[in-house]
Image (cartoon, rainbow, N blue to C red):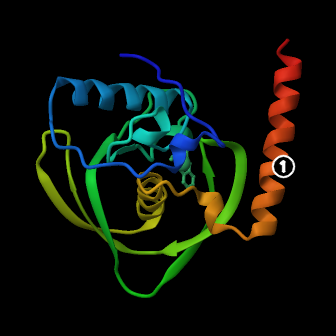
Amino acid sequence: MALLPILEVPDPRLREKSTPVEVFDDNLQRLIDDMFETMYKAPGIGLAAIQVGVAKRLLVIDLQQPEEEGGEAKRNPLVFINPELTPEGEEKRLYTEGCLSVPDQYGEVRRPTTIHAKWLDRDGKAHGERIDGMLATCLQHEMDHLEGILFIDHLSRLKRGMLMKKLVKERKLREESSY
Ligand code: GNR
Ligand code: NI
């Protein structure tokens, strides 16, 4: 197992469109394990392969994670490979999102409340399910990464501009204080 470096804006690789996973070999299993380790360490509730520089249509989610403080983490690791999402119904929900690739910045994003998802698991087995709540929100956020889209793209230009300026400022402060 290994911790992988997480790409941050404005890394151009975050804008790449990821391509389907075709081979379910040991390398893929290792990548999935490393992505979980990296996500738990961050900590985050989701991670797309492109965030660790691999442009494959693969993402991992564990909604249990950050809530655990002290005691055993009740882990619920989910793997989605080559996912396809279809909104179900017209209802949207607003949620304050963050992203490991846009560190310490948050903004409200409106997305469909309920989706139908089709995907392959780590063994290449097909699944299909109706999904709502936090899992639907997170899955759509991760799915965006596979298309080179970040949550900040869903904000107004003004909001995005302010958030990016704040990110640059905070990054500079952090670099100064670590030397
Ligand atoms: O850790 C994360 N939290 C989060 C909160 C609200 C909506 C989406 C997310 S995903 C994010 C981890 C991440 O950047 N995944 O791509
Ligand atoms: Ni993200």
Seen in the image, is 169 located left or right of residue 145?
right
Q: Position of residue 101 (x, y in %)?
A: 60, 41
Which of the two residues, 71 or 119, is positioned nearer the viewer here?
119
Which of the two residues, 118 or 165, is positioned nearer the viewer here?
165
Tag 1: residue type? Lys
Q: Dividing the picture into quarters, in which one does residue 100 lie?
A: top right
Looking at this view, name the residue that lies furthest to the top: 179
- Residue at point 76% right, 68% down? 157
Name the residue tied to disc 1.
165
Q: How many marks?
A: 1
Quadrant of image for the C terminus: top right
Looking at this view, name the residue that lies furthest to the bottom: 90
- Residue at point 70% right, 54% down? 106
Q: Dividing the picture into quarters, in which one does residue 53 lie?
A: top left
Q: Position of residue 24 (x, y in %)?
A: 15, 35
Mark 1 Cα within 10 Å, few/some/many (few <14, many 20+)?
Answer: few
Q: Is residue 144 above or below residue 55?
A: below
